[in-house]
Image (spheres, rainbow, N blue to C red):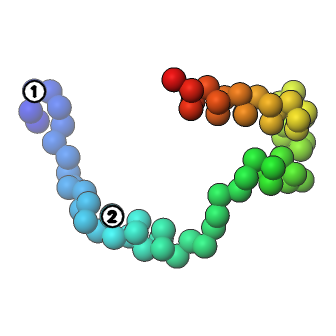
Amino acid sequence: MNDGCLEPDVELDTSRFCKAHQQRRNECFCYRATLDELLADDVMKPVLRNAGYEPEEFREMMTEMARNLITP
């Protein structure tokens, strides 16, 4: 113990972690869905409605948020 803090029992092997992460990333053939694809998804429609949004209303909100992130 050092200044009331516990010493770690095991050190993290970051090189092994990074290699495993890189291998998983290289194996993934996924792509990022567009907002249109997400809003058209059958699962998203009830989720949005349950949250109180219609797809077009949600699209407008996300577009405005994106503009706010880009505009200084």
Q: Nearer the viewer, residue 70 or 31?
A: 70
Give the image location of residue 33, x and y in percent.
Answer: 71, 56
Badge 2 marks a residue whose secondary structure is helix
The residue at the point 24 percent across, 62 percent down is: 13
- Asked if residue 59 is positioned above or below residue 39 in the image, the reply reads above
The residue at the point 75 percent across, 47 percent down is: 35
Q: Nearer the viewer, residue 37 or 16?
A: 37
As drawn, is 6 to the left or to the right of 63? left
**Res. 53 image quadrant:** top right
| Residue found at the far front of this picture | 71
Q: Is residue 50 visible?
A: no
Q: Nearer the viewer, residue 55 or 10?
A: 55
Q: Which circle's residue, 2 or 1, is located before the other in the chain?
A: 1
- Position of the N terminus, as image quadrant, is top left
**Res. 19 image quadrant:** bottom left
Residue type, numbered disc 2: Phe
Q: Is residue 61 visible?
A: yes
Q: Which mark is drawn over residue 17?
A: 2
Q: Of tags 2 and 1, which is closer to the observer?
A: 2
Q: Residues within 10 Å of mark 2 (few under 14, many from 20)?
A: few
Residue type, numbered disc 1: Asp
- Asked if residue 38 is positioned above or below residue 54 in the image, the reply reads below
Q: Which mark is drawn over residue 35?
A: none
- Residue that numbered label 1 is attached to: 3
The residue at the point 33 percent across, 64 percent down is: 18
Q: Residues within 10 Å of mark 1 (few under 14, many from 20)?
A: few
- Asked if residue 39 is positioned above or below residue 53 in the image, the reply reads below
Give the image location of residue 16, x and y in percent.
Answer: 29, 68
- What separation in Å lies between label 2 and label 1 (alpha carbons)? 29 Å
Q: Nearer the viewer, residue 37 or 9?
A: 37
Give the image location of residue 48, x and y in percent.
Answer: 84, 37
